[in-house]
Image (tube, helix red, strand yellow):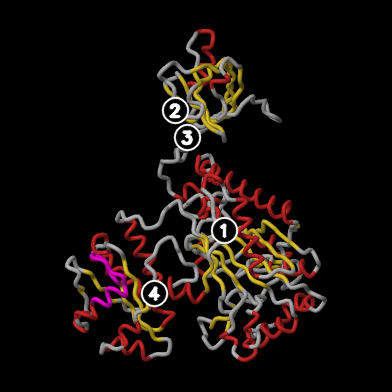
Amino acid sequence: MELFVTRTNTCGELRSAHVGQEVTLYGWIQYQRQGLFLVLRDFQGLTQIIIPQDEAHAHVKKLLSNAPVESVVRVTGIVSLRPPGQENPKMPTGDIEVKVETAEVLNSCKKLPFEIKDFIKKSEALRMQYRYLDLRSFQLQYNLRLRSQIVMRMREYLCNLHGFVDVETPTLFKRTPGGAKEFLVPSREVGKFYSLPQSPQQFKQLLMVGGLDRYFQVARCYRDEGSRPDRQPEFTQIDIEMSFVDQAGIQRLIEGLLQYSWPKERGSITTPFPSMTYEEALADYGTDKPDTRFGMKIVDISDFLRGLDIQFVQNALSYPHGTVKAICIPQGVRYLKNKDLESLKESAKSQFNQEVMEIICRPDGSLKSLLTKFLGEKQQSELIQALNMQVDDVVLLAAGEHKQVCSALGSLRLESADLLEAAGLVLRDPSAFHFLWVVDFPLFLPKEENPAELESAHHPFTAPHPSDTSLLYSDPTKVRSQHYDLVLNGNEVGGGSIRIHNAEQQRFVLEKVLKEDSEVLSHLLEALEFGAPPHGGIALGLDRLISLIVDAPSIRDVIAFPKSFRGRDLMGNAPDYVTPEELEPYHIQVSWPLEEKEAKKN
């Protein structure tokens, strides 16, 4: 018997063992056929319902035959075996049907904006406008339930097995320097605003100063980043901080956490996860979040070409950090068209301002390229060996400054992998999960808009690598940090660091290196002077992690009520206008651009 509700069973649980029982089911009409039978659906599954045809049940027949699809009904009836040959092995309830005795339409459904079935293509705008209908689909039900189970397992692991304390931190706080843009919330004090935190960073550190030892939270975070296709203005992190811990300790904790909460149907994951430095990731994969499910690594051929009299090569190598590198696209001749190669070269030019030259390995083993006229027979075969080229492979070669060349080739590596897979070559196993730690990030990076100034690569509270501490004061650009990222299949799913727990060092980083006003963080700096323990932590991007586990095309598919990529809620139409009277207590006025003034008048 079901607890708390008047149904006796769900629509997914009746089997041949229930034959002869009287049951009461509630659900939505998924499908109805000529007044003979219907398929009833609830969160757990489907059950075939036989509509009675005899005179005594005429009113039941009329009721169920006329109820539109997606109406909510109650049916009470007897479980019976389906006639021989009519069983449906694809349905868990496929051996039985329920013969209706009484029924009631609890709520009839008007004409639907789209069919609920999963295979029907519907525009995303329409799906988001009627999100409550979209939630009825099998896929979204599955995603949200799996998400709930994973979070539950994470809580168990952290709180019950490892003594973490679940603490809610404030959502109304104040602006923090650096980092992502924050949403402002007006207050009733003239000219003063709250800020929605982009993460509980300061609070988690203050909880360590407060002696909580181990903190965890399923934390809502807010970033006003405008429209970025796979970002949400509000998102969820699994937020963690520990005292008296080092980098290895946090990494082992997270590996254990993921292993414990990993869904059984997705196979098992092996620990410890492999680790790679930021420099290695950049040199081999051209990115700080390498997809290690396939090869095609970047190869450095500078030394091989150094001795040759090729003008563009010599130019590139004469620069500091000058280099020549290449990637090899397996079977590129067979799978890529000329327009594909052109689009790859074009994207390197437009995104990275990087020229790229191709080398093709012909069926007879000779090379076709603008390079070959500079190469003798012996040098050609040496090049083939250096790049491990096979017949029909295509090599993309780039010369220039190390970071730019690597980034361009890293991007081409992913683009060409997509092209190869679109053409039918399987490079990345869709069921594989490749976790990876990326470590030894630089502590500071030059600002893009002004390379003479520095900004934090992670955030201003990250501690320098113990062996680089002295460099902090002499040459901050060379300092490695104790920051670590967790990467899954080429996506960053987590990032954390060991924090600075010394007030002097924290003040120096803020004021002298980053040239930030440390006054805004005076509470944190002061806290560090009252006996702050060494501490560190990490945050996992829950939405991104779940979307990779269920292989969803977008993180919107694992969030119940997501925003559109412009940050709008298409269902409730938010954000929305408020009246001048509502703004009055906040001492705020809206200054309308002229064309909007006109539009509002008309």
320 or 113: nearer the eye? Answer: 320
- Would you name the residue on which mark 3 appears? 111
**Which comes before the other along the chain, label 1 or label 2?**
2
Residue labelled with disc 1: 271
Marks 1 and 3, how far apart at CA: 51 Å
Q: Dot 1 lies on which element?
A: loop
Left or right, 488 with reference to 155: left
Relative vertical location of residue 339 with respect to residue 268 in this rendering, above or below: below
Give the alpha-carbon distance from disc 1 to disc 2, as whole Å: 38 Å
Give the residue at x 40% y 62%. 294
Disc 4 residue type (three-letter): Ala
Inspect the image, locate mark 3, and give the three-letter code of the amino acid beneath it: Lys
Q: Residue at x 46, y 54 (%)?
A: 432
* Residue 261 image position (x, y, % from top left): 61, 50
Q: Residue at x 71, y 30 (%)?
A: 4
Number of marks drawn = 4
Magenta residue span = 381-395
Q: Earlier in the sequence, mark 4 or mark 1?
A: 1
Mark 4 or 3, nearer chain start: 3
Label 2 to label 3, Cα distance in Å?
A: 32 Å
